[in-house]
Amino acid sequence: MTDLRWPTVLFDFDGTLGNTIPLILASYRHTIERFGLAPADDATILSWIGRTLPDMFTELAGAERAPELIDAYSAWQADNVAAHLVAYPGVDELLVYLAAAGARLGIATSRRRPSAEALLAALGLHEHLPLLVAMEDTPHHKPHAAPLLMAAERIGADPADCVYVGDAVVDLGAAHNAGMAGIGVTWGAGLPDALAAQPSAGVVDTVDQLRALLLA
């Protein structure tokens, strides 16, 4: 088996490991309509992915209203997972391959822990990813380095030996800020040109290309 370029591979979740994009779009649309917020098109909502719900709803509706909107968004999303969550073909096989090659695997996500755990289980990916750093675990969030550094610490890795894989500009920014290599994937919410403009070890269009880039 070919050697790994990085012994520790950390992932974003939304738009990277699981196609939660339709679920996120629908959840935001529901919440925006229910609470009479300013309409937002899909491109605008996609640009929000990677940021935390408290940050987004505080920005959209103010700190006082944000908790109510977060609860409504989260409840609707939990009730509609089956209709909107989609697996990315090849991701499961990639994780199995990396684990067999000896990689230490984990997630650093801006999603809240209960939701992340539920979606990972729904996709059948939870068994491959023993480490999860979620929104609640750090006071600062991507593109801040804190979530990625906590993931490296918990998994027992030097940040310089880690690569972080994500679909958003904030993911590559967080990797850079954490002193990690970053890989952008174009099958999620991020725009390819925007990802390519960030410091990274590369931007890939397919899971096969990601696998090749992770190998020495």
Image (cartoon, helix red, strand yellow):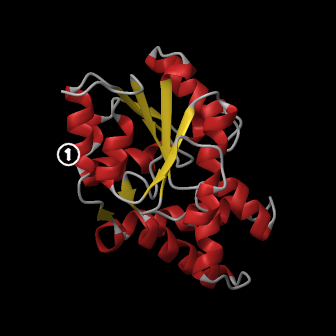
**Dot 1, crowdedness within 10 Å: few (<14), some or many (≥20)?**
few
- The three-letter code of the residue at mark 1 reads Glu
Vertical side of 46 occupied by 39: above or below = below
Q: Name the residue under label 1.
A: 93
Which quarter of the image is occupied by the N terminus? top left
Q: Which of 72 and 172 is in front in this view?
A: 172
Tell me where residue 60 appears, x and y as whole percent: 76, 69
Q: State the residue at coordinates (33%, 48%).
A: 120
Count of all numbered marks drawn on residues in the image: 1
Which quarter of the image is occupied by the C terminus? top left
Vertical side of 16 occupied by 83: above or below = below
Tell me where residue 154 appears, x and y as whole percent: 49, 19
- 23 horizontally vs 40: left or right: left
Q: State the residue at coordinates (62%, 83%).
A: 41
Label 1, secondary structure: give it: helix
Q: State the residue at coordinates (39%, 27%).
A: 5
Q: Is residue 142 visible?
A: no
Q: Is residue 187 visible?
A: yes
User: Which quadrant of the structure image shows residue 190?
Assistant: bottom right
Vertical side of 146 occupied by 64: above or below = below
Tell me where residue 203 appears, x and y as whole percent: 50, 52
- 159 horizontally vs 6: left or right: right
